[in-house]
């Protein structure tokens, strides 16, 4: 089944695009739909495959364009782990990532205000962070030996 945007999702998309003077095209809507539909931090290639179920002729270049727009509009975040291709995440709340090196699965780890404040406390005076990236790599199960 293909995930369908609910009214709130559509409103978020439309108003974010409008702020940049853009319209919710079928391509942009479908790409956003795919990212919200399965929050497994897909790469652009994976997103292309999923969008093609709805728009069979969409090109990778168009998908890249849509992704750039969605990131620009703060609807989706880019996630870079290891030297792997960029992944996309619709979770806009502050969070860290955990990548399971066994399965390649990526998990969102919520962060409370205290944790964020602790992290920011390592910044030297005069350093103003706009963003941060925190990711763990490891295993989600205890190793059996
Ligand atoms: Zn995430």
Image: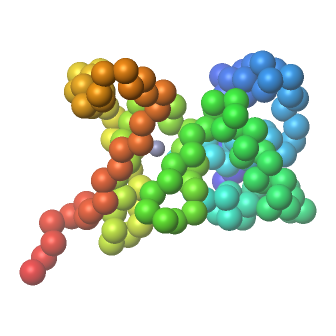
**23 to the left or right of 14:** right
- Front-most of 21 and 47? 21
Q: Is residue 4 visible?
A: no
**Residue at figure coordinates x 75%, y 38% from the top left:** 69
Give the percent coordinates (x, y) of residue 109.
33, 41
**135 to the left or right of 115:** right
**Residue at figure coordinates x 50%, y 36% from the top left:** 91
Give the percent coordinates (x, y) of residue 97.
38, 48
**Residue at figure coordinates x 57%, y 40% from the top left:** 77
Q: Quadrant of residue 15?
A: top right
- Front-most of 114 and 27? 114
Give the percent coordinates (x, y) of residue 16.
72, 23
- Front-most of 81 and 37? 81
Residue 127 position (above or below residue 60)? above
Residue 66 position (above or below residue 92)? below
From the image, which quarter does the C terminus lie in? bottom left
Q: Residue furthest front?
A: 126
Which colouring convention does the figure follow?
rainbow
Q: Residue furthest bottom?
A: 145
**49 to the left or right of 118:** right
Q: Is residue 91 visible?
A: yes
**141 to the left or right of 137:** left
Total numbered labels placed on residues in the image: 0
**Residue at figure coordinates x 33%, y 72% from the top left:** 102
- Front-most of 109 and 120? 120
Residue 39 position (above or below residue 140)? above
Give the percent coordinates (x, y) of residue 43.
60, 59
Q: Quadrant of residue 120?
A: top left
């Amino acid at each position: 089944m293909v995930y369908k945007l609910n009214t709130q999702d559509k409103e978020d998309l439309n108003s974010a695009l409008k702020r940049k003077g853009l319209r919710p095209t079928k391509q942009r809507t479908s790409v956003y739909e795919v990212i919200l539909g399965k929050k497994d931090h897909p790469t652009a290639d994976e997103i292309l495959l999923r969008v093609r179920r709805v728009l069979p002729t969409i090109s990778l270049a168009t998908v890249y364009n849509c992704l750039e727009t969605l990131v620009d509009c703060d609807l989706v975040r880019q996630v870079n782990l290891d030297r792997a291709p960029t992944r996309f995440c619709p979770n806009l709340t502050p969070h860290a990532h955990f990548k399971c090196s066994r399965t390649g699965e990526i998990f969102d780890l919520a962060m409370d205000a205290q944790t964020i404040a602790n992290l920011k406390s390592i910044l030297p005076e005069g350093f103003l962070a706009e963003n941060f990236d925190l990711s763990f790599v490891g295993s989600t199960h205890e190793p059996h030996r």
